[in-house]
Amino acid sequence: MTATLLFCVILAQVQPVQFSGTASMYSEYGWVTGDSLVQPRPELRFNVNPSLSLFGFPIGLDMLMSTQENPLRQQLDKFKLFLNPKKWLESQANLSGLALSLKGLELGSCNPSWTPYTLSGAPVFGGAVELNPWYVYAAAAAGRNQRRVAVSDSTEGAYARMLYSGRFGFGKKEGTHFYLTVLYAGDDTVPPANNWQPNPNDTTDTFEVVRPKENYVVGAEFNLSLAKDAFRLESEVTGSELTRDKRLPVEHWDWMPEWVANTFKPRMSSSVDYAFKVRPSLNVLDTRVYGKLEFVGPGYQSLGAPGLRNDNMAIGGGIERSFLDNAVSVSAAYTSEHDNLLAQAVEDSLGRVVRVLTMKSATTRFTNWEASLGLTFPNLPYLQVGYYPYTQATDNLDSMAQVASTSLTKGNVVSVSAGHSFETGKLSHSPGVSFSYNDVRSPASDSADNTSWDAGLNYGLGFEFPLSLSASCGLSRSVAVGMDPDQRVYFDVTPSYTLFEKWTNSLSLGGTFGSGTRIDTRLTSSFPIWKICDASLGVSDAIYNGNDGKYNDLRLTAQLSKSW
């Protein structure tokens, strides 16, 4: 009853209907002359982002349409309708349970993100919903993950794929919780056009370019937060079954329970693997100490997480500390990774490793250290210093799986930046300097040795009248074994002036001089068109002349935008 009365009070204080949003139209046209073989395609792009508020309840729309849309690749045009009442409810009143009920609802082109091992970075054209009422959590996503694309000279082609995922558990998403996640992604069996191509080694034979896949993922996530996040533990374990050709018959092995075969449908082209992570952290007395242990098996794959790297194990940790009201900050970290997780060592009677059974011809181990210092005292110049040494060792194996050799690479990266903002009279100044150094050495062979560094200066100047000026310049040099040193000088100057408080114009002039010469110029003018919309016009030209050729790249851009 109390919640109902409070909700009615909120509705009485807001306007019944509010309509706002932004819309823009962008176009680009270019010409490239000279030795470049790449010709830019004219583009016209529309963005519409209206928002409708009914008694303060927001309903949003994101829409993108472009002339670059091409049926020979995955869809570029986007359309999404979304609701996010959580922020609105929290801004109106402190409603303990109701405020966290519906966290979001999306329809159209969605990008739901559950965890890095299950669903993250995969587009879903359909719908996604996430709820967290009180201590119950539920989420779901369903829709088309990829469309059917014909095989061509520039594409490999793809089957149409549907993706379904759901999560259920208990606890706050930002705090302590236990969630179960399931995901299914499967292609249809209608092949894309031109899927059978002639075999280049046998003109009388053909081969299939792509095959329909099927993927099951099951995972559990447990996060623990104690003493207002003073101690936090993030953990997850997931299993994956990937079928590389779902047209093969389902296998019913004697050792496998019948319900497993009926649920996950294993086939001769299926592989099963797992992944897990554990990340503890302790945050007390302005000091944060953290660690991580992550494992992704060689056969683990989720079609809902296309960017996940498998066959990798990482262990590491670090510490962060701040002093004097965050004016001084220091941090240090360590990470060690290696692949080829199926490799097994075979020892002789004396315990010596004589053979390595492996699925790969090499095992790579990467070790990285990090150390940084930051000084940001009020009214004083800031300073940021970082040192990042690393080593990479690769064990190369011969055809009999004997350890043939180990190649070792050591690197050191140093970065330094400093600057200060101050005023003198009616002028505001923002000078800064930066320096970076990278050194790579191989003790066994100097063929991969290289050294590079970059030193730069930048300066920002603001006047009392509407004129601002920014400028930068620098020198970079790279030296590699067997190659001539590459040394470059670069600069950029950009003045900007506003007329009549509404008409902003900027001119950018930049250049790079070294093995080749490149000059870049760009003029941009932004102004309102009465009360209808805002306009922006731009013209840019890049002229390059070097030993590898020369070209002239001219681009014209125009944009109309409106906010209401």
Image: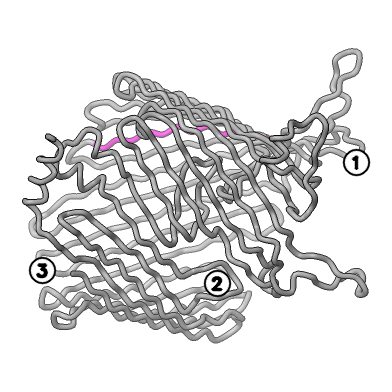
Question: What's under tag 1, amino acid-wise?
Answer: Ser
- Check residue 492 for magenta coloring: no
- Residue at 12% over, 34% down: 2
Q: Residue at x 7, y 51 (%)?
A: 12
CA gap between label 3 and label 1 equals 73 Å
- Residue receiving disc 2: 516
Left or right of residue 100: residue 55: left
Relative height, residue 152 to residue 475 (above, below):
below
Q: Secondary structure at mark 2?
A: strand
| Sequence order check, earlier mark of 3 and 1 | 1
What span is in magenta? 365-376
Q: How is the image coloured?
A: one colour
557 lies left or right of 71? left
Upstream in sequence: badge 3 or badge 2: 3
Any magenta on residue 371? yes
Residue 56, quarter of the rendered image: bottom left
Residue where numbered disc 3 is placed: 465
Q: Which residue is mark 1?
A: 399
Query: In terms of image quadrants, where is residue 374?
Result: top left
Give the residue at the far top of this rendering.
350
